[in-house]
Amino acid sequence: MVLLKERGFYQELPAIPPEEGRWLRMPDESRAATRIWIERPGKLRWESDHRFSGDSPETTVGVKDGERFWVRDPEGEVESNADRPFATQMSIPEELLFEPAPLLAVLRLQLDGETHVRGRAAIGIHGTRRHGGPMSEPPELLPWFADEWEGLVDRERGILLYLGALVQGAVLSSAEVVEIAFDEPIPNILFEPLS
């Protein structure tokens, strides 16, 4: 919180009269574990468990088929654009791991050696913010209060196996692939619309 205040990304909320309630406290830590299935072109399913400061997980499930999507929130409500597929779009931050091209617009990248991770050959990358780039909105996995970013790119497939946002040399936020498989059959039922 202190860092966000120092960098101008956080402001104190105005006081609420006691009889009207109180602001929710921001969690000290949040973690998410997301399982993703991709069938190209255009099919995606994700199941995310989010935990805030050690609380019980909140599960979100989603399916994308081209521009159409269905998302079930932790309360079981389903939101969809199936009846208006081009009116709204949606994506999840983790999609950047599998389609990392938007990084080129917002980060100046340097190669940082070769390694192996999760049994895959990978190339290390190091990035700093590209000022005046063509993107007005950075991808969600790139918090703008970070000083630099580090990542591991799968040498064969070009996907990101890891992406970390650093502040003063310490990792503040990260996303990593902990298990991955390619070219395996995926049951069609995983991509059926949610109800």
Image (tube, helix red, strand yellow):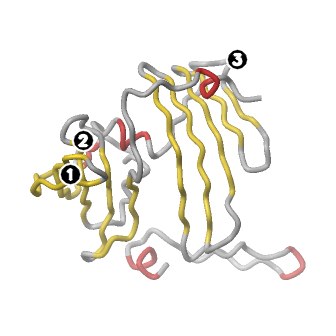
Q: Dot 3: few (<14), some (14–19), or many (≥20) neighbours within 10 Å?
A: few
Vertical position of residue 23 compared to residue 152: above or below: below
Of 113 and 149, which appears nearest the observer?
113
Residue at coordinates 59% horizontally, 49% vertically from top-left? 48
Q: Is residue 28 left or right of residue 194?
A: left
Residue at coordinates 45% horizontally, 77% vertically from top-left? 5
Which numbered circle lies on residue 58?
Answer: none
> Is there a contact, CB below 8 Å, between mark 2 and mark 1?
yes
Q: CA distance from mark 2 to mark 3?
A: 33 Å
Q: Which residue is farthest right?
A: 19
Of 101 and 54, which appears nearest the observer?
54
Q: Secondary structure at mark 1?
A: loop
Q: CA distance from mark 2 to mark 1?
A: 7 Å
Vertical position of residue 120 compared to residue 166: above or below: above
Q: Earlier in the sequence, mark 2 or mark 1?
A: 2
Q: Is residue 157 left or right of residue 29?
A: left
Q: Can you identify the residue that label 3 sits on?
A: 83
Q: Can you identify the residue that label 1 sits on?
A: 130
Q: Secondary structure at mark 2?
A: helix
Q: Dot 1: few (<14), some (14–19), or many (≥20) neighbours within 10 Å?
A: some
> Is there a contact, CB below 8 Å, between mark 2 and mark 3?
no
Q: Is residue 3 left or right of residue 167?
A: right
Q: Position of residue 33 (x, y in %)?
A: 53, 55
Three-letter residue code for mark 1: Arg
Q: Can you identify the residue that label 2 sits on?
A: 105
Q: Position of residue 29 (x, y in %)?
A: 54, 73
Q: Earlier in the sequence, mark 3 or mark 1?
A: 3
Q: Dot 2: few (<14), some (14–19), or many (≥20) neighbours within 10 Å?
A: some
